[in-house]
Amino acid sequence: MAGKVWFVGAGPGDPELLTVKGRRLLASAGAVLFAGSLVNQAATLFTPPGCEIRDSKDMTLEEMNAWLVEKSARHACVVRLQTGDPGLYGALVEMSRPLTAAGIDWAVVPGVSSALASAAAAGESLTLPEVTQTVILTRVAGRTPMPPGEELEALAAHGSTLCIFLSITLLHEVQGALRAAGWAEDSPILVVQKASWPGEEKIVRGTLADIKRRCQAEKIASQAMIIASPALGAADWPDLARSRLYDPAFSHRFRKASTPENPA
Ligand code: SAH
């Protein structure tokens, strides 16, 4: 049997944030390889009886690749379940290339990234008219070095929204980079741990000056998203530039601008 391998985004943690398509594939999967504790609940909730379920947390990349190749010879549908979206820090290329080389069909189902779930948890918008219209998804260097030109200081110089993955243990480096890029000490910073996890989510709001102390006080040392953005906290601003999309003088495809002859 020539099975197909699906790289499915499990979303940020809440099983209800899995896509309908992801859920359908899990329900018909003969084998599921899932990425550690972050997605196991979704894996066991939606898989059929008899499905082979394996946690990949103690496996090397080579072992995972061999597992997927082996299972796809025995099952029509094999799922590799990954946190958030498979295309962000998910080793998708390293895992799909051996499948292609072995002549195995594969495809990707996107997922809700933790960057978006973290903003949602805090009720924040990552973009705001006339404040920032750009979101940068990045990290600071850990064992994986940053390519030239992608140092956080250089990216922060844009002054736009930064969603910083995989960096909560390097918060001092994040602070240093933002300071070097000219961010003020009172710039708002948001940290969300286990965004969307029922009963486990933690939201910490602070400033460039105190965010590290606040995270230490909350004992946040893993599974956390750092969001730095000039748009944070806008829900409480006294003055807000109005989004052009809802401006009564702005026509678009779905609505005519209101004019004296055509009032809103
Ligand atoms: N593909 C994933 C990211 C994997 S890298 C996605 O799209 O979200 C792992 C990093 O993602 C963690 O270090 C953390 O920064 C972030 N992360 C994953 N799940 C998270 C969650 N539920 N809440 C906050 N951050 C999370």
Image (spheres, helix red, strand yellow):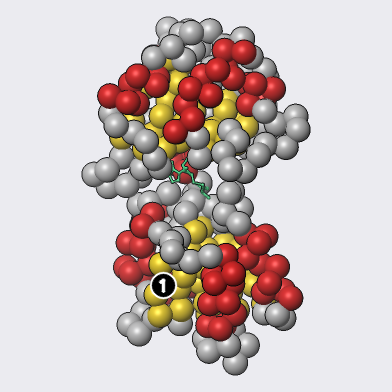
Q: Residue at x 57, y 12 (%)?
A: 179
Residue 253: quarter of image:
top right
Q: Residue at x 72, y 81 (%)?
A: 103
Near-viewer residue (88 or 212): 212
Q: In the rendered image, is residue 24 in sight?
A: no
- The location of residue 2, given as percent across then percent down, is 63, 88
Q: Which three-letter amino acid code belongs to the residue tagged 1? A: Arg
Near-viewer residue (216 or 18): 216
Residue 202: quarter of image:
top left
- The location of residue 196, given as percent across then percent down, is 35, 44
Q: Residue at x 46, y 78 (%)?
A: 31
Q: Is residue 149 above or below residue 261?
A: below
Describe residue 239's horizontal placement relative to residue 153 as left or right.
left
Q: Is residue 111 above or below residue 215?
A: below
For the residue labelled by badge 1, is the local secondary structure a helix, a strand or a loop? strand
Q: Residue at x 39, y 40 (%)?
A: 222
Q: Is residue 181 above or below residue 144?
A: above
The residue furthest left is: 199
Q: How many marks?
A: 1
Q: Quadrant of the C terminus?
A: top right
The residue indicated by pointer 1 is: 54
Q: Quadrant of the N terminus?
A: bottom right
Near-viewer residue (107 or 64): 64
